[in-house]
Amino acid sequence: MRILLDTHAFLWAIADDPRLGPISRELIDSRAEAVLLSLVSLWEIAIKHSLGRGDMPITAVQALAWTEESGFDWLPLAPGHILCLEDLPPHHRDPFDRLLIAQAISEDLTLLSADAVFSSYGAPLQAAGC
């Protein structure tokens, strides 16, 4: 299984936050064939941090370093992801999350997230709190 981390799941993973449940932690640490972080998440981190959002405790530079230290792979944004995005139903309005969903669907990835709305898109989902 290849997993794509939602931005908050990435933040929980690198901070060893207990909100990332034991099943998700085991999946990241040992069971997943690949753990991916999207460049969309890096973009989200950079924007929210630059705007002074309190829910974004790290900078993009820190995210880059932690991604490399953790051995996570980067998922670039590709034209096929944008085409998939255009066809998504409007269940979710957050543009970053919609891009992550499109990437997960396009690349046949399991999305690791605590966002319950993601399940309405039919993409494989691992609840981050489990």
Image (cartoon, rainbow, N blue to C red):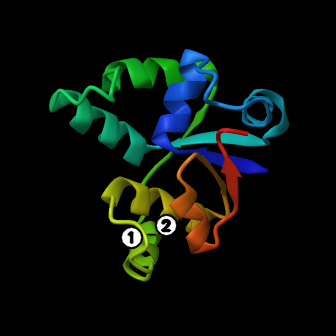
Position of 128 compared to 89: left or right? right
Residue that appears at 57% across and 71% down: 120
Depth check: 49 or 63 in front?
Answer: 49
Q: Residues within 10 Å of mark 2 (few under 14, many from 20)?
A: many
Number of callouts: 2
Circles 2, 1 touching at the beta carbon (< 8 Å): yes
- Which residue is denoted by mark 1 in the rendering? 82
Depth check: 63 or 10 in front?
Answer: 10
Residue 122 rendering spot, x and y as whole percentages: 64, 73
Q: Secondary structure at mark 2?
A: helix
Tell which circle, 2 or 1, labels the residue nearer the N-terminal end: 1
Q: In the picture, residue 53 is in which quadrant?
A: top left
Q: Secondary structure at mark 1?
A: helix
Depth check: 125 or 36 in front?
Answer: 125
Residue 113 rendering spot, x and y as whole percentages: 58, 47
Residue 78 rendering spot, x and y as whole percentages: 43, 62
Residue that appears at 17% across and 29% down: 50
Quadrant of the snapshot with the C terminus: top right
Residue 33 rendering spot, x and y as whole percentages: 79, 42
Say which amino acid is labelled 1: Ile
| Vertical side of 61 occupied by 44: above or below | below
- Which residue is denoted by mark 2 in the rendering? 102
Q: Residues within 10 Å of mark 1 (few under 14, many from 20)?
A: some
